[in-house]
Image (cartoon, rainbow, N blue to C red):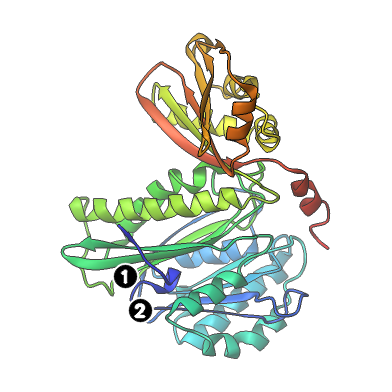
Amino acid sequence: MKAIDAGVCAPQGFQAAGIRCGIKGGAGKRDLALIYSKAPCTSAALFTTNQVKAASVLVSRQHSDRGQIRGLIANSGNANACTGEAGIAAARRMAELAGAALCIPVEQVAVASTGVIGVPLPIQAIEGGMEALTRALRSDVRGHEDALEAIMTTDTRKKAGALEIEIAGLPIRLGGMVKGSGMIHPNMGTMLCFITTDVCISKELLEKALRSAVHRSFNRVSVDGDTSTNDMILVMANGEGHNPRIESPGPEYAVFAAALEGLCVSLARAVARDGEGATKLITVTLRGAADEASAEVLAKSVVSSNLVKAACFGADANWGRVLCALGYAGIAFDPRRVEVAFASAAGTVCLCKEGTALAFCEEEAKQILLEEEIEIIVNLGQGEAEAQVWGCDLSYEYVRINGDYRS
């Protein structure tokens, strides 16, 4: 794998744009994005598990069933969720507008929205911006950057990436962007993620690769324990890399699936690092479990613990909170065999062995936890399986952001 530039515009045949159409109040803030493939696509998508689903999710799920999405229109500043039949009509109108502008069937357009829940979507603003949005389509890094900016809400960092791999001797590219900062929790945490690729692959295998990649990336991220009404990840593959079509599991599929997972993990880590009010990225590495599923559940319990997150914010090596979070995860293990260590660029300190405290230097531990990226390493001593999950600390700023989010 080789990292490259241009995000969703890195693969052959894709264009992107982002403009300000007036959904957001602030002057100059882009709030409407478009991603488009010149060639027909094979597509795959996953959506929120929340029972309360935004209008964009309902419309996009219906369109994505055919696996032929080649256009995506997205807005920020308004979630278009809990807005009744008017919201559904607005989401459908967004798809119609994009379809007409791109000269493609409306069923080949996905819709995404993010922002405040329960407020009617000002569809007139989107209608008024479509001509400028279509005109702004570009196939370079500028198009990608503009579209990414247009889907951001409380995000403080731009989260994107692209890479190049080789399949059958041909260069194949993948590019992605993601927005997400709050209401993040496993099973799709609040986010919009759009991935483009010029690989030629069947719908069935693209869906398989996406599910596997999301399971080991976005479904292992937690910021604050909430999942949203609008979560969505979409992959569009237009085949412009001209590799022999991947139609069965094998070496070519394995290379592509690994690349997709690698891109998703990178984007998921970026989401965790940009958690609302976060000052630190927390990685929990759980080793020595009986199986990967158990390791994942236990690691998620630790990274989701508000007490663990608060201790990381305060650089307090309170390893007892880690054991406590393991203990209520619902997975059987022997506490007398557990080891806990904290690590960062400043070093590693082992705090607990065989379930009991070890002597350690508090000042050394504090310096380790003051770093922007820290790792909590747990070894259960019961097997060979392991899993890694990501989260962030819990700061005063998180409460400030969410205390007046609507304003």
Q: Amino acid at mark 2?
A: Gly
Callout 1: 10 Å neighbours few (<14), some, many (20+)?
many
- Residue 72 in view here: no
Q: Secondary structure at mark 1?
A: loop
Q: Where does the image place residue 28, in percent across and percent down from the top left?
A: 70, 80
User: Which comes sooner in the sequence, label 1 or label 2?
Assistant: 2
- The amino acid on which the numbered mark 1 sits, given as a three-letter code, is Asp
Q: Is 204 rendered above or below residue 387?
A: below
Q: Which residue is mark 2?
A: 13
Q: Is residue 178 above or below residue 149?
A: above
What is the x, y in percent for residue 344?
Answer: 52, 37
Q: Is residue 180 visible?
A: yes
Residue 194 vs residue 237: left or right? right
Contact between marks 1 and 2 (CB within 8 A): the answer is yes
Residue 390 to residue 111: above or below:
above
Q: Residue at x 21, y 65 (%)?
A: 245
